[in-house]
Image: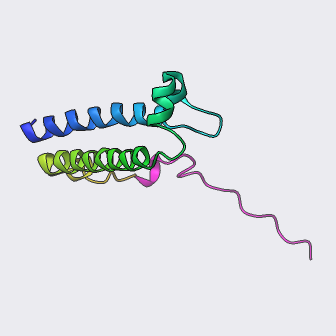
Amino acid sequence: MSILTILLYILFVLASIVLIVVVLLQEGRGGGFGEALGVGGRETFGAGARGINTFTAIVAAVFLVSGLSIHMANRSATGSSVLDEQGVPEIAPNSMPGAGVDLPAPPPSGN
């Protein structure tokens, strides 16, 4: 595992923790965790808290970009998939259930 991948994992975990805390701090219709902090929490994360919404969007973008970057780094490190190594399995016609069973002929019509 390269140093870049390790740093991306650390960034991903930190962004997820910050995102959880920031979402819990936002005030909903019935209040929120921000009110549990008292007057300072209401002043910081009050009804006109445009800053916290912007910060949440930035942290969410960092979370998304770091997750996609981890995927791309791991994908380019391996360079192949399981199907490339094993190939597509072939199913023999006689290995399927009911294969090779002779069906009876239909009954003659009533004319």
Residue farthest toward the bottom in the current orientation of the protein: 111
Q: Residue at x 34, y 33 (%)?
A: 18
Give the tally of numbered discs: 0
Quadrant, the C terminus:
bottom right
Magenta stretch, main secondary structure, is loop
Q: Residue at x 45, y 46 (%)?
A: 95
Residue 20 spot, x, y in % from top left: 41, 33
Left or right: residue 67 compared with residue 27: left
Q: Residue at x 54, y 43 (%)?
A: 47
Q: Residue at x 30, y 37 (%)?
A: 15
In this rendering, the answer to whether 100 lies above or below 19 is below
In this rendering, the answer to whether 37 lies above or below 50 is above
Left or right: residue 6 compared with residue 46: left
Indicate the quadrant where residue 40 lies.
top left
Residue 5 spot, x, y in % from top left: 14, 40
> Looking at this view, is 2 or 86 the one in front?
2
Residue 32 spot, x, y in % from top left: 56, 31
Left or right: residue 12 compared with residue 99: left
> Looking at this view, is 2 or 7 the one in front?
7
Left or right: residue 2 compared with residue 21: left
Residue 39 spot, x, y in % from top left: 50, 26
Specify the segment rendered in magenta. Answer: 92-111
> Is residue 108 one of those drawn in magenta?
yes
